[in-house]
Image (cartoon, rainbow, N blue to C red):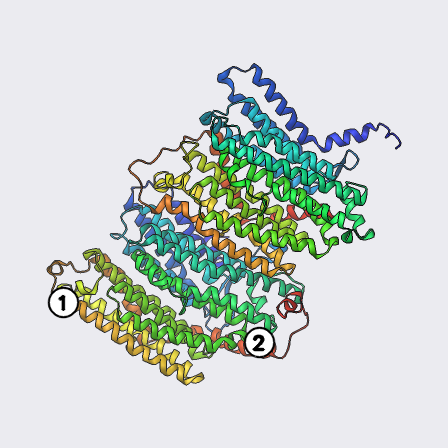
């Protein structure tokens, strides 16, 4: 088999392995060879992005199921396999991950000065874990990648973070870990339930999809998955770790956290919690949609009173992810496609916002809004970038944010008018807090002498900002190529969701199992 | 009683079934004799002698294979289970001796009796794990324990060492009494001390309704609970672990646990299903208490050895979850976890042995500050072992916990599984604290220089790290081995 053919057949595995191999290679570099370490990391992440492009090219938009599937038995006597694949739901989130990584790496040239080698190793391990989360279609494999994300992120916050980094790092770790261990128990319960019903041990997600799970069991399992993902998203009121983590993390950490890690939660809802337990998901919808709307409004209101730009962006994330959750739990094509698109949008625009905050922090070592003012005259390139990103974050028509939020509101309106109406006010609030911040930082008189000497963005900074701006406008003006590739998968999801819900409501299937009895309290 | 005729073939078969034990004992005696003739500077040869003896014992165990060999008219058996636990214990002994090469030089335990006691104790562990008669189990337990009491107090001029030894000895003697009394009661109810025979009689004699027998089983359980430090029989653990020479602590934590749990597994797997839910419920409560008290107490520790002592209590609780499950899956998970625990625990103790520059107060967590970036290999290894102890993928510790908790779920103990994973979440906090000190807190002006590891010591650490990582990614063959081992027990 030639190299190209192998690459062709194992594309997703290569995407998982490449950053890890890069990380292993970095270990052999001398510690103070900062230049070569940075260059190699950048090359690895760019290679990873280029290798992920064939995923889009070979993706068949008409197919609903998993594509580019690879399947290798792993622990066969337990039915655990290494299965990876991509469909219209994960495609763009996967691409977002490989796209944002080189940008993030490039942003650390001047921001990360100590322990560069370890930093880059953790970034690459993180990339492997993130790619793994989005392509794994075996629950065991998924869980391993899901947990693997925690360790590098913990180090990124704890070692390279700000003043209160220890607190933020351990809080991040504990909150997300508590959520996920309960999901682990739920995975095990589901696994034995599948065995009890079919006589086959498997953690293959596609096989588990075919299962009709009794309603009562669904409610419990959904609750466990809900906790894991709600912490990760994070949904109100599970969000308290997020502002701490965002504020204390180094810029690169914040970008990855906002752009990719939070998407793991929303992606998890769609791929696992909602798809596996449709009745429970439908039952929980009023609660989740209400929490989503509260999150939208609460995040926006708290963002409004922030003095620190980074904290403001952090709370705006809570608000934006409320939109995503609202879209997902509309259970229709518009809502879900809008939500997926909004995940990508949020990754791009909030990622860009954190980069912008990072750029200015490197120059002034402060992020307080009151320290700035009138920057637009001193740093014109910076202010142009900042403005486009701000507009995108607000969701002004013509930018990506508009398309996503519009679809979500459309989807939500079809199901529950009032959620959509209240959520729409969140867009207005977003305009208030973002524009007010932008105005106070960029316009007016220059009150602080130091701001007069600010240097504008340099070539490297412009280089990594331009791709982000391009996508903001591209998705804003012509989202069709993105949406078209989701259609088949999302349509299939909605159809299967309804069918499975009806089947489960029609009654428990054969196999009144030990577990079912346990949850019916008849043990 | 008619005299038993001399049967040479049976004797040979019996000796054959305890070949690894014989080799260990012979090595221990050889070490004692060599100690008399070797000059003071040649004492490190003693350790090398112990290492080669253990290696020979490993080869012997492997040559016996997984087939069943009964010895001494059913007193002892070499079966799949015996092989698995034998290999675990011998691996622990081997790694301990490798580490002892360095440790003895730094801390002055370069003495013949030190190695001889270690080897005698290891032989006792093997007897205990392979005993199919309660008397063999008891003899094995004593052969294992008495050398360890001495080893804990080996630093004769250190108060902590003596305190730990006295506490361990007094409570241990008491627990042995319980165990023996339990065996006596069981004998009075059944007329035999053979475990399979007792198990066979439970149904026929309605032993589960016989208070004498049930109390006997309870006392037996207390004896074992003491050895593996289940709450509330754990009081001695932190003091003994902290006071003992660190290399002995590592040996105790991994070896004693493996031996005692193996013996407990032989008893519980055969008798508990017939004894009804009461016994299992008692185990359930013990498992819950042990996990929770161990983890919560570990949160407060600033001394690394004490922290790992409480962590070892918590791990005993996790392993007990497998016994609560009480079927093949549970036993298999427990065996697998014992093996994994041995390596990650020895690894963690090994690294802190290198980092602590003084045996007395060198184990304060504050001494780790700044180590991580200054000594990246040591820092990375300790992080790996701690992450594995915490049960985070992709390490062997995660796979081990996964199977323990799935065994519990499979048998309907979902509540216990939930409590177990929440306990893991709690444990994250104290397992990550050393990591925080190593990497995230500002380094002091002068970072203590770790002891230079010898080749043997580095080898032990690398082997442990390799096992922890490899079993985390490809646990398949070892899991199968563990499954066959438990099945051999039920045949």
User: Dot 2: few (<14), some (14–19), or many (≥20) neighbours within 10 Å?
Assistant: many
Q: Which is more N-terminal, label 2 or label 1?
A: 1
Q: Residue furthest right?
A: B2
Q: Nearer the viewer, residue B53 or B164?
A: B164
Secondary structure under badge 1?
loop
Quadrant occupied by the N terminus of chain B: top right
Q: Nearer the viewer, residue B365 or B476?
A: B365
Query: Would you place residue A75 above or below residue A394 in this image?
Result: above
* Residue A506 rendering spot, x and y as whole percentages: 62, 79
Q: Which residue is mark 1?
A: A374
Residue A500: give its label: 2
Residue appearing at x 35%, y 69% in the figure: A318
Secondary structure under badge 2?
helix
Instruction: Measure the alpha-carbon separation of dots 1 and 2.
Output: 57 Å
Chain letter of mark 2 equals: A
* Residue A259 rendering spot, x and y as whole percentages: 36, 64
Q: How many marks?
A: 2
Q: Is residue A90 visible?
A: no
Place residue B126 in its image quadrant. Answer: top right
């Amino acid at each position: 088999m030639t190299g190209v053919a192998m690459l062709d057949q194992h594309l997703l595995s290569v995407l998982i392995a490449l950053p890890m191999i890069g990380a292993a290679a970095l270990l052999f570099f001398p510690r103070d060879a900062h230049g070569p370490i940075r260059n190699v990391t950048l090359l690895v992440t760019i290679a990873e992005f280029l290798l992920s492009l064939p995923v889009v090219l070979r993706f068949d938009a008409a197919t609903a199921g998993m594509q580019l599937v690879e399947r290798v038995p792993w622990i066969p006597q337990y039915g655990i396999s290494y299965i990876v694949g991509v469909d219209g739901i994960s495609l763009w989130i996967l691409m977002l991950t490989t796209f944002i990584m080189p940008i993030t790496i490039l942003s650390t040239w001047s921001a990360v000065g100590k322990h560069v080698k370890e930093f880059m190793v953790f970034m690459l391990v993180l990339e492997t874990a993130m790619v793994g989360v989005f392509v794994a279609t075996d629950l065991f494999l998924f869980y391993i990648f899901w947990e693997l994300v925690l360790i590098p992120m913990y180090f990124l916050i704890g070692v390279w973070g700000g003043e209160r980094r220890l607190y933020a790092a351990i809080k991040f770790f504990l909150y997300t870990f508590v959520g996920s261990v309960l999901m682990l128990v739920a995975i095990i319960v589901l696994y034995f339930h599948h065995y009890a019903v079919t006589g086959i041990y498997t953690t293959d997600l596609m096989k588990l999809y075919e299962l009709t799970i009794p309603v009562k069991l669904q409610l419990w399992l959904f609750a466990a998955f809900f906790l894991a993902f709600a912490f990760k998203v994070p949904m109100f009121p599970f969000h308290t770790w997020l502002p701490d983590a965002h504020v204390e993390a180094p810029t690169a950490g914040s970008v990855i956290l906002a752009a990719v890690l939070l998407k793991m939660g929303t992606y998890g809802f769609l791929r696992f919690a909602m798809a596996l337990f449709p009745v429970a998901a439908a039952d929980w919808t009023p609660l989740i949609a209400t929490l989503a709307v509260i999150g939208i409004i609460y995040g926006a209101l708290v963002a409004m009173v922030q003095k620190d730009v980074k904290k403001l962006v952090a709370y705006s994330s809570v608000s934006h992810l409320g939109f995503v959750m609202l879209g997902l739990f509309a259970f229709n094509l518009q809502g879900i496609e809008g939500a997926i698109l909004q995940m990508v949008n949020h990754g791009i625009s909030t990622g860009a916002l954190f980069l912008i905050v990072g750029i200015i922090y490197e120059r002034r070592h402060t992020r307080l809004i009151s320290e700035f003012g009138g920057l637009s005259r001193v740093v014109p390139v910076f202010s142009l970038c900042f403005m486009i990103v701000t507009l995108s974050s607000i969701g002004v028509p013509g930018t990506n944010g508009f398309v996503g939020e519009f679809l979500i509101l459309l989807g939500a309106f079809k199901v529950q008018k009032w959620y959509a109406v209240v959520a729409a006010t969140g867009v207005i609030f977003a305009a208030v807090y973002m524009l007010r911040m932008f105005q106070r930082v960029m316009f007016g008189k220059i009150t602080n002498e130091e701001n007069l000497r600010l240097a504008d963005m340099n070539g490297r900074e412009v280089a990594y900002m331009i791709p982000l701006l391009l996508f903001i406008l591209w998705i804003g003006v012509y989202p069709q190529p993105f949406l078209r590739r989701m259609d088949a998968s999302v349509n299939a999801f909605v159809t299967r969701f309804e069918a499975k819900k009806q089947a489960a409501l029609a009654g428990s299937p054969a196999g009144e199992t030990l577990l079912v009895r346990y949850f019916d309290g008849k043990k | 009683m008619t005299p038993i005729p001399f049967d040479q073939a049976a004797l040979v078969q019996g000796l054959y079934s305890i070949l690894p034990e014989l080799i260990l004992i012979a090595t221990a005696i050889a070490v004692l004799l060599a100690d008399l003739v070797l000059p003071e500077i040649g004492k490190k040869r003693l350790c090398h002698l112990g290492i080669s003896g253990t290696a020979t014992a490993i080869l012997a165990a492997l040559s016996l294979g997984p087939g069943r060999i009964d010895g001494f008219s059913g007193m002892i058996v070499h079966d799949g289970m015996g092989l698995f636990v034998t290999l675990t214990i011998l691996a622990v002994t081997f790694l301990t001796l490798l580490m002892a090469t360095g440790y003895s030089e730094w801390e002055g335990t370069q003495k013949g009796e030190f190695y001889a006691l270690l080897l005698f104790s290891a032989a006792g562990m093997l007897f205990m794990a392979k005993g199919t008669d309660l008397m063999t189990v008891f003899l094995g337990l004593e052969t294992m324990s008495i050398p360890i009491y001495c080893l804990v107090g080996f630093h004769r001029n250190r108060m902590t060492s003596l305190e730990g030894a006295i506490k361990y000895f007094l409570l241990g003697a008491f627990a042995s009494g319980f165990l023996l009394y339990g065996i006596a009661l069981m004998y009075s109810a059944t007329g035999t001390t053979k475990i399979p025979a007792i198990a066979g009689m439970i149904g026929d004699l309605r032993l589960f309704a016989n208070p004498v027998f049930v109390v006997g089983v309870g006392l037996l359980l207390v004896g074992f609970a003491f050895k593996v430090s289940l709450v509330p029989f754990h009081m001695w653990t932190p003091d003994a672990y902290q006071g003992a020479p660190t290399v002995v602590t590592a040996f105790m934590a991994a070896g004693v646990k493996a031996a005692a749990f193996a013996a407990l597994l032989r008893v519980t797997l055969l008798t508990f299903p017939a004894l009804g839910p009461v016994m299992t419920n008692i185990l359930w409560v013990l498992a819950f208490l042990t996990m929770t008290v161990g983890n919560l107490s570990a949160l407060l520790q600033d001394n690394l050895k004490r922290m790992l002592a409480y962590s070892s209590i918590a791990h005993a609780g996790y392993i007990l979850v497998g016994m609560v499950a009480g079927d093949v899956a549970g036993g298999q998970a427990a065996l697998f976890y014992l093996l994994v625990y041995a390596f990650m625990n020895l690894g963690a103790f090994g690294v802190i042995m290198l980092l602590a520059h003084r045996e007395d107060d060198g184990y304060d967590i504050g001494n780790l500050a700044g180590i991580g970036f200054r000594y990246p290999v040591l820092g990375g290894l300790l992080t790996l072992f701690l992450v594995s102890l915490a049960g985070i993928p992709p390490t062997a510790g995660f796979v081990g916990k996964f199977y323990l908790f799935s065994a519990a779920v499979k048998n309907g103990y979902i509540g216990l599984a939930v409590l177990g994973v929440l306990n893991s979440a709690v444990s994250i906090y104290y397992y990550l604290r050393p990591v925080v000190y190593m990497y995230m807190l500002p380094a002091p002006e002068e970072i203590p220089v770790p002891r230079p590891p010898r080749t043997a010591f580095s080898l032990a650490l690398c082997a442990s790290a390799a096992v922890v990582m490899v079993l985390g990614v490809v646990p398949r063959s070892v899991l199968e081995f563990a499954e066959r081992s438990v099945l051999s027990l039920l045949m």
